[in-house]
Image: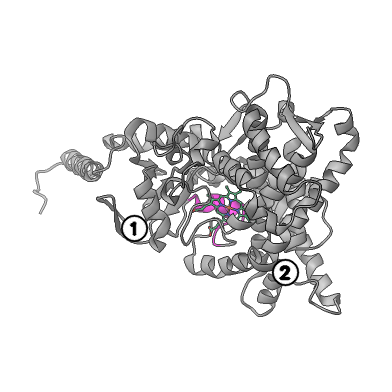
């Protein structure tokens, strides 16, 4: 009972005091290192840091400052930033971390909320959709990927003949994006596309996704604030919806289905059986088309820069290609024999990863390395930082020697692992090998004068990538004689 003489002011003061005590106890409950809750200032500061530095940049900041297991807050929600191998492994392998996190409104704007696969947090739906991706990225798709990559790379290089012959600068990132998109289309969709136009729409889509992913809810109260991002996402969605329509027509008109069935047709059939909505079909195809160009093109760009900066590694890679492949076209059997190339790719993915963290959410209570983790806790697995751990001989240098002895998977996870790992990990390795072999057999690729990986400006947010547009990212192709 509130005593009668108690005034409204006293009551308010008591309520405030109670609130402060509750907040302090919430802040004090966590046993994990990290900034103090400090009456809500901690959560505000950590969130601002994530918005300001980008997810990757802020994660590195907190792991650097507080250690490899840190508690921060994003949008007021408890978030763990983890770069300790044992804890990363624990999260990766358990299905109770199959969720991802991000602004619901932001994801809705880019069509990823409860749709597609990459940020689909509706676990039942994600599981169903993932099966279509796994099917498309294994079996015949995987078998055909290398040949298609070699063929497409050769064709694109030929189309640049004049620029290359005059040692002009090639926009290498866009070249790689077009090659990968062309191959993705031939594997998963098979309709005529305008690669350049779609590549620019994909880049705008990625920018919107990155910008909106962690935005506060109030940002979505004012349409003028997010409209341009929503429009950019919509442009790609419309373009992909048109392609799906073309595919649908092609399927209806086809006399025999054998040659026209693939990932897209499987989804279209699933929709006609009432198992998927039109929007979900479009989103799955959109995500399949963006997954490769978003990741592999930047990875290959980093690799070409690393080769140019490490001539000894380049010589080893090229010697192996000359010995095992020579003048012939790369075959699937060669892919597993190119050991030096594989070591080079692994070391590049370790040293300069494009996807250097993974975002997860706990779908059940759990304990990680002795710390209680509540259901709903957000998790950032800072894989890029983990891969620079003491296990490696020269963790902070690019050295093929880092992979001289077998590396246990708990120290090296460029594609994640477990139930929510990268579905494209095998095809990505096949494709990157085929594209690298096709380029390196003919050319030595050099960056613009004075440019190196260290001095090009990069963005460290949803992924780690070069800042564009920057003409200094362009590279020169110098013909290489095989007997050189
Ligand atoms: C260099 C190339 C690539 C890298 C480094 C990479 C890396 C990753 C990583 C780290 C994740 C998150 C894994 C996790 O949370 O544990 C991921 C997810 C994913 N990747 Fe890749 N990826 C690459 C290429 C590809 C390709 C070529 C495709 C498909 C064509 C693809 C499709 C996906 C999809 C669909 C997911 C989401 C899986 C899910 O949430 O269930 N990736 N990738």
The image position of residue 247, as x and y in percent, is 79, 67
Disc 2 crowd rating (10 Å Cα; few below 14, some 14-19, many 20+) is many
Q: Earlier in the sequence, mark 1 or mark 2?
A: 2
Residue 330 locus on image (x, y percent) = 75, 53
Q: Position of residue 306 (x, y in %)?
A: 63, 32
Mark 1 or 2: in front is: 2
State the residue in front, 316 or 11: 316
Instruction: Check residue 375 in the rendering and tell me which mark sits there, or answer none.
Output: 1
Q: Mark 1, residues whose alpha carbon is within 10 Å: few (<14), some, or many (≥20)?
A: some
Q: What stretch is highlighted in magenta?
A: 102-114
Q: Is 21 situated left or right of 307 in this image?
A: left
Relative to 418, is 330 on the left or the right?
right
**Quarter where residue 288 is shown:** bottom right
* 106 drawn magenta: yes
Residue 233 in sight here: no
The N terminus is located in which quarter?
bottom left
Give the camera-side residue of 417 and 366: 417
Position of 483 relative to 415 (above/below):
above
Query: Is residue 435 something one can see in this rendering?
Result: yes
Extreme residue in the top direction: 450
- In terms of depth relative to the viewer, which is nearer, 59 or 325? 325
The residue at 67%/74% (across/down) is 271
Residue located beneath label 2 in the image: 262
């Amino acid at each position: 009972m509130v005593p009668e003489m108690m005034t409204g002011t006293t009551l308010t003061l008591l309520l405030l005091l109670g609130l402060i005590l509750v907040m302090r106890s919430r802040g004090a409950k966590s046993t994990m290192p990290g900034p103090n809750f400090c009456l809500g200032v901690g959560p505000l500061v950590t969130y601002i840091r994530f918005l300001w530095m980008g997810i990757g940049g802020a994660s590195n900041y907190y792991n650097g400052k507080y250690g490899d297991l840190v508690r921060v807050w994003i949008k007021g929600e408890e978030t763990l930033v983890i770069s300790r191998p044992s804890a990363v492994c624990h999260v990766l392998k358990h299905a109770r971390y199959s969720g991802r996190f991000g602004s619901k409104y932001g994801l809705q704007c880019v069509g990823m909320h409860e749709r597609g696969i990459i940020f689909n947090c509706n676990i039942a739906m994600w599981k169903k959709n993932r099966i279509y991706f796994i099917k498309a990225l294994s079996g015949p798709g995987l078998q055909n990927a290398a040949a298609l990559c070699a063929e497409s790379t050769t064709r694109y290089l030929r189309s640049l003949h004049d620029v290359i012959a005059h040692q002009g600068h090639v926009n290498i990132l866009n070249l790689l994006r077009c090659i990968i998109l062309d191959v993705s289309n031939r594997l998963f969709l098979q309709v005529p596309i305008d690669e350049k136009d779609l590549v620019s729409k994909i880049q705008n889509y990625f920018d919107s996704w990155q910008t909106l992913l962690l935005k506060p809810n109030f940002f979505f109260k004012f349409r003028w604030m997010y409209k341009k991002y929503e429009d950019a996402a919509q442009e790609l969605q419309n373009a992909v919806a048109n392609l799906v329509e073309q595919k649908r027509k092609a399927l209806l008109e086809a006399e025999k289905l054998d040659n026209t069935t693939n990932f897209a047709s499987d989804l279209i059939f699933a929709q006609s059986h009432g198992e998927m909505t039109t929007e979900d079909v479009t989103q799955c195809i959109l995500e399949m088309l963006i997954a490769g160009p978003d990741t592999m093109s930047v990875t290959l760009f980093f690799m070409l820069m690393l080769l140019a900066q490490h001539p000894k590694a380049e010589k080893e890679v090229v010697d192996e290609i000359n010995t095992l492949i020579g003048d012939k076209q790369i075959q699937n059997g060669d892919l597993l024999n190119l050991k030096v190339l594989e070591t080079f790719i692994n070391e590049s993915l370790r040293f300069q990863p494009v996807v250097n963290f993974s975002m997860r959410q706990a779908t059940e209570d759990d304990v990680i390395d002795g710390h209680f983790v509540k259901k709903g806790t957000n998790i950032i697995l800072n894989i890029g930082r983990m891969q620079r751990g003491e296990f490696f001989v020269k963790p902070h240098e690019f050295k093929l020697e880092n992979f001289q002895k077998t590396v246990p998977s708990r120290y090296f996870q460029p594609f994640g692992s477990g139930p929510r790992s990268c579905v494209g990990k095998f095809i990505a390795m096949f494709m990157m090998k085929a594209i690298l072999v096709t380029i390196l057999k003919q050319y030595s690729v050099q960056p613009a004068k004075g440019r190196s990986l260290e001095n090009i400006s990069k963005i460290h947010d949803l992924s780690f990538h070069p800042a564009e547009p920057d003409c200094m990212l362009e590279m020169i192709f110098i013909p290489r004689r095989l007997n050189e």
